[in-house]
Amino acid sequence: MEIIISPERMYEFSEQCRSRGQRVALVPTMGALHRGHISLLDIARRQADVTVMSIFVNPTQFGPREDFNEYPRPFEEDCRKAEMALCDVVFAPTREMMYPDNYNTFVSVENITERLCGASRPGHFRGVATVVLKFFNIVNPHVALFGQKDAQQVLVIKRMVEDLNHPVKIAVAPIIRENDGLAMSSRNAYLTKEERAEAGTIKRSLDQGLKCYEKGERNAAVIKNEITSILSRTDFLSMEYIEIVDTRTVRPVDTVPSPALIAVACRTTQSKTRLIDNVIAGGSI
Ligand code: PAF
């Protein structure tokens, strides 16, 4: 496995692959790799000849009171895991390479970034869209892989790619979960023992909502009530939002369409860790 730091070298490497007729896949990450990331690499390998995983903790997607400084950065362990998963290249540029002095260009995807996570994390999706477009320009992949766990991120990136006529194909991978249903996330490492023991409640509540939909319920308020009633049974989670939105507009619905995104965000009460999760009713994103 090759580790590339410089964007120029990364671009050149990718161009050489393309000139040999090889398909390039990109898995963008912020490191602290878990089985969710490895599953993206596995899917990438099936869709391309060369897999590139970017590892970059992107400062522009963190708010001033968020965990940019604390975010785990086990780079050597990540490289070992990527290599074990048969990744071809880890691309790990420095902050200065990505955002040199006098950096002034940002990508703002409008309307669909204002609700759900965008409401409590102003500027987050502007940072995500900016860094992801930069990675698309540097790596020039045929296909890029994203996890359904960050469903709004997927919708934002798909919209950006379509609106800006980027030829990359966006592939969405299923959420990888712990045994109790907790969606894998690098931030799960922040949870206290008590919080971790209760965190499976999030998925149980979403499953209950989905069950209700599958039985024919289309009233969003009824489904949201089912989810709330389960989530409010634990003292270790405080709810940020429970929303059912149209996957095109990311607007809340009264009557649940197909497909619809049923999404939850909570903060744990002890370590104040923000956890998100979702299910898609009636289709996929
Ligand atoms: O999902 C993530 O880890 C990040 O938001 C991404 C896509 C790598 C951009 O920094």
Image (cartoon, grey):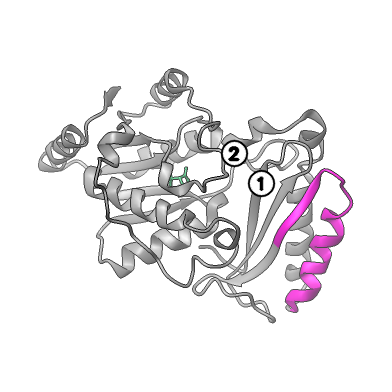
The reply to whether callout 1 and callout 2 are in contact (CB within 8 Å) is yes
Q: Secondary structure at mark 2?
A: loop
The N terminus - image quarter: top left
Residue 49 in sight: no
Residue 190 quadrant: top right
In the displayed structure, does residue 38 sit left or right of residue 133? right
Residue type (three-letter) at the residue carrying disc 2 = Ser
Mark 1 or 2: the one toward you: 1
Q: Which residue is mark 2?
A: 185
In the image, which residues are magenta? 219-241
Residue 59 drawn at (x, y percent): 42, 42
Instruction: Please rate how many residues cluster around mark 1, counting C-alpha atoms within 10 Å: few if below 14, some from 14 to 19, many from 20.
Output: many
Q: Between 256 and 78, which is closer to the camera in this rendering?
A: 78
Q: Between 93 and 158, which is closer to the camera in this rendering?
A: 93
Within the magenta stretch, is there residue 221? yes
Within the magenta stretch, is there residue 234? yes
Quarter of the render that holds ligand 1? top left
Residue 107 drawn at (x, y percent): 33, 60
Is disc 2's CB within 8 Å of ligand 1?
Answer: no
Instruction: Please rate how many residues cluster around mark 2, counting C-alpha atoms within 10 Å: few if below 14, some from 14 to 19, many from 20.
Output: many
Residue 218 drawn at (x, y percent): 73, 78
Q: Which residue is mark 1?
A: 275
Q: Quote the CA–CA distance across marks 1 and 2.
A: 8 Å
Residue type (three-letter) at the residue carrying disc 1 = Leu
